Image (cartoon, helix red, strand yellow):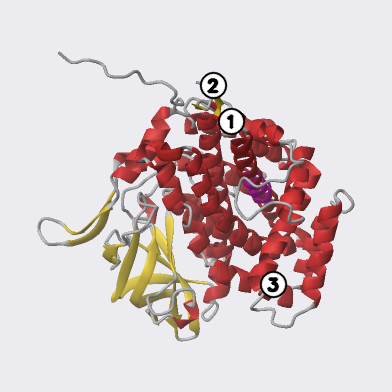
Amino acid sequence: MTRSTHTVTNQSSPLVGHDVFGGDAALAEGFARHIGAEVAAEATAELAALGRTAGTAEAQEWGAQANAYPPVLRTHDRFGHRIDEVDFHPAWHQLLGRAVEAGLTDAVSRPWGNLRRTAGFYVWSQVEAGHGCPVSMTHSAVPALRAQPELAAVWEPLLTSRVYDPGPGPAAGKAGALAGMGMTEKQGGSDVRSGTTRAEPLAEPGAYALTGHKWFCSAPMSDAFLVLAQAPGGLTCFLLPRVLPDGTRNAFLIQRLKDKLGNRSNASAEVEFDGSTVAWRVGDEGRGVATIIEMVSATRLDCVAGSAAIMRQAVARAAHHAAGREAFGARLIDKPLMRNVLADLALESEAATALMLRLAAAADAAAAGSAQERHLLRLAVPAAKYWVTKRCTPLVTEALECLGGNGYVEESGMPRLLRESPLNSIWEGSGNVQALDVLRALQREPGALNAFLSEVGRASGADHRLDAAIKDLLTDLSDLSGIEARARRLTERLALVLQGALLVQHAPPAVGDAFCAARLAGEGGAAFGTLPGGADLGALVERARPVNEG
């Protein structure tokens, strides 16, 4: 006879059945603030539908399965023919298909497209982050391809399509397409100008034969890839299709898949081009970096959004757990010290979300012709990418600890968030690359600093600690001695000042006050959970709690 030895009590319920969009006050309010009135109702309804799907148990199971069963490389078929295929679990296709259907690869076909797409990317990435890589690459390939109008005419309608068509085939036979990217090589890393891949012109105008390798190629089962290679005129950008126009397979040889810390659902590969690999030039010879930088800039904003999404999901899980768990006679969420931890985490998450939305709105304004917003993006995007992505891992670590031992168990979902958390800080340029790019923007584009100062100046006088931080920043900028060694500190301060200005203007007073005290005035400690005594912890925590309809 089997006897029950215990009854399960004091366990929090699963965080399911909630609206990932509408239950996130910082996101919903920020989106409403930026979106144009003429499309607000339609855009909000779309995001609410996506948010409700993201909160379902079914969607969460897709994320778990896609990571439990990672992609598998098949270089040859049973007869020995080279095929270079990567097999994915069906859950991967569910995730990616829903992303494409929701327009997360399209920022150009509708008003306020960047803002709507970025908010959707943030919502859907909270289900599973790995499939965000091909989503981001596909979206960001469009502005780069426009450097070669005849290629853009063929590929842009496919890349922005709402149809997920994963099978290999020529562009003419596809209902939708995905794009990947290959820049880095084993000898160069971020120094892409040191690439050794060669491109030799073919008889067909604009076509080249490539010989070389790529140490990291994102999303190797995509339909096309933007790659860099050394043409006769210098480093050049190319479009490399996986299937040629006549239906034959291009020589895109996948040597192996990377065994990564996180991002397990997504395939990242080492690939070889054997001299018969055909690609078409994008932009002029020798202008490779200038051409592909359009793609890089767009993906950097997605790195901000992806990290903000991970942070938000970690905070939501921690707050939900603390509300449903008791210790020492009261709910965890009501304990003063736990409330300080949760409030501090919520503050960091909201600052990241506010900055993400402001940059997405700026991208729309820049696309519409605003030079001011374009200048702002030139400085703010690398600063935001540097800071938000770096704050992700310590935040997730602390949020995991809020669940105690439960958080260290895979079933909680927190370990997957933790493994994912460092990626965006590395992807599309590590911290040093971003900090040096900030210096480059300051030195080469005076309009960038002017736009930044104009932006933060809108909050002038609203908080004396913010005013002091702006003054200190200007002092830093006036002293260029040893500036490269100080680039990280300068970049950090740029990001913090911009976040502070946004929160002081637009967030509830409790949020702006706590941020200025802890992040700008130094009244908080180095670890999370050290907000100063005057912070309204209750307001911060309640604002961050997910609205659960389940």
In space, the residues marked 1 and 2 are separated at their CA atoms by: 19 Å
Q: Amino acid at mark 1?
A: Ile
From what the image shows, is residue 147 above or below residue 191? above
For disc 3, the marked residue is: 441
Image x and y of residue 455, in percent: 80, 56
Across and down, in percent, residue 422 comes to 48, 57
Q: Identify which amino acid the numbered label 2 is placed on.
A: Glu
Using residue 422 as the reference point, say whether residue 499 is left or right of it: right
Judge the density around disc 3: few (<14), some (14-19), many (≥20) Cα neighbours within 10 Å.
some
In front: 159, or 496? Answer: 496
Instruction: For mark 1, give the secondary structure.
Output: helix
Residue carrying label 2: 549
Which residue is tagged 1? 333
Q: Residue at x 67, y 54 (%)?
A: 363
Q: Residue at x 80, y 60 (%)?
A: 469
Report the front residue among 397 and 471: 397
Magenta residues? 348-356
